[in-house]
Image: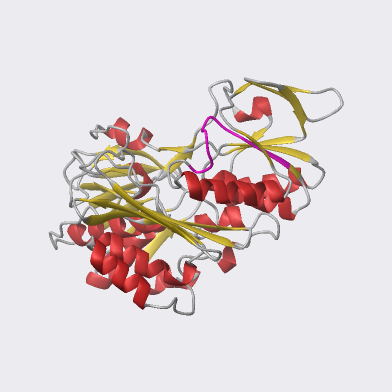
Amino acid sequence: MEQWDHVVVGAGIAGVSAARVIVDQNAQHRVLLVNGEEGFPYKRTRLSKRIAEGFSPNDAYLEDPAWYSEHGVEIRNSSRATEIDAGGRIVRLSDQSEHRYGSLLLATGAKPVYPPTFARKEEAGVYTLRSVADLTAIRAAAVDARRILVDGMGVLAVEVAEQLCAMGKRVTVAGAAAQLMPRNLNDRAAEILEHLLLDRGVKLRYREEMLAIEKRSKGGFSVSTIREAAAFDMVIVCIGVLPDLDLAQDAGAAVGRGVLVDRHQRTSMPGIYAAGDVAEDEEGRVTQLWHAAEYQGRIAALNMVGQKEEGDLLPFRMKCEVFDTYFFSMAKPENLVDVEIDERESADHYRCFYYSAGRLGGAVMVHDKARARLYEQAVRERWDRDRVETEFDRRSPPRGED
């Protein structure tokens, strides 16, 4: 049985961020990074943006493959953690190896959600997009497909639809929501996005739910929804993800929607931390945002090496760029009671600020990419209305990426 100072289970951005911080704080600490996929860790958010042209992990590595050995991080690709003995501080992997740890980080991420009508995706011929293997399967199936159903209304569904349009496919986007990206966009921003999709020939079906899917003798599938039945050559499900809790629950960790953590990213089990899409913070948030996972991985790592760092419950941005149009959302309130709304629109862009008690609490923006960092700073620092108006009126949009 090998002995490690730290074991990180999961090699998405939360896990890799933690490994970076650990070796930066103490290069002598032995770190094991458990990666459930074949290749080296890559930026998962690029998958939905590379369906048309193809995706190469080489172009999206979180770190160069040589970085891990150069920094004393042993990475186990194609290996999963199957069991945690929290009392003995032992983790067992799918390759039958056992490892003793000083501290352990759960960064197991999330799993795609399927419609309740499907027991297993193999039975229905349904695709999801969460890994390079998923992307490879979708691209192979899409070659001969003409009519494709994208089930979902969120960011992933919109990005997948854009890519399929670029491949010349006839796309239908259907989902239970009454608008596109309801978690992130307000009515006007969603309307702008809707027009972009409609202009490209995408059919939109709101307040819909897939009730059944059957293979057709002539190929493809017959999909029954609440309002109609239609034929499609393939179906891609993008209705969301849920934290991958299996390992944590079996080990005895306290869970809610995700693994419950405090502001140090500690779980209920001594020596075990959680970060990223699997973690639920003290406010009940499971953010599912890239920068949030990166931040949580850093906070967890600092505590794993003994720094006793307390994280802030910061808001993080969502960005989505489709059809040459940039969408930004940060801390959009769910409840608009006692919230002041300031909307402004020009020929070039749209923005909406949400104020609570005179302070900026959230923002939604369309096509003002060059000032995205300014929006982010304003929301995070909770500027007052006067400062918001002064700064945004005074500063012309800077050049460059956000």
In the image, 200: left or right of 373? right
| Count of numbered labels shown in the rendering | 0
**Magenta span: chief secondary structure:** loop
Along the line of sight, the residue nearer the viewer: 397 or 62: 397
Magenta stretch: includes residue 177: yes
Rendered image coloring scheme: secondary structure
Relative to 53, say whether 141 is above or below: above
Which quarter of the figure has residue 152? top right
Which quarter of the figure has residue 204? top right
Q: Can I make out residue 349 in this image?
A: yes
Along the line of sight, the residue nearer the viewer: 67 or 205: 205
Which quarter of the figure has residue 363? bottom left
Q: Position of residue 201 (x, y in %)?
A: 74, 46
In the image, 91: left or right of 401? left
Q: Can I make out residue 27 in this image?
A: no
| Residue in the picture at 55% in, 53% down | 38
> Magenta segment, which residues?
171-181
Q: Quadrant of the C terminus?
A: bottom left
Q: Position of residue 123 (x, y in %)?
A: 66, 25
Relative to 274, say whether 379 is above or below: below
Along the line of sight, the residue nearer the viewer: 286 or 185: 185
Q: Position of residue 327 (x, y in %)?
A: 50, 57
| Residue in the picture at 79% in, 47% down | 143
Along the line of sight, the residue nearer the viewer: 195 or 44: 195
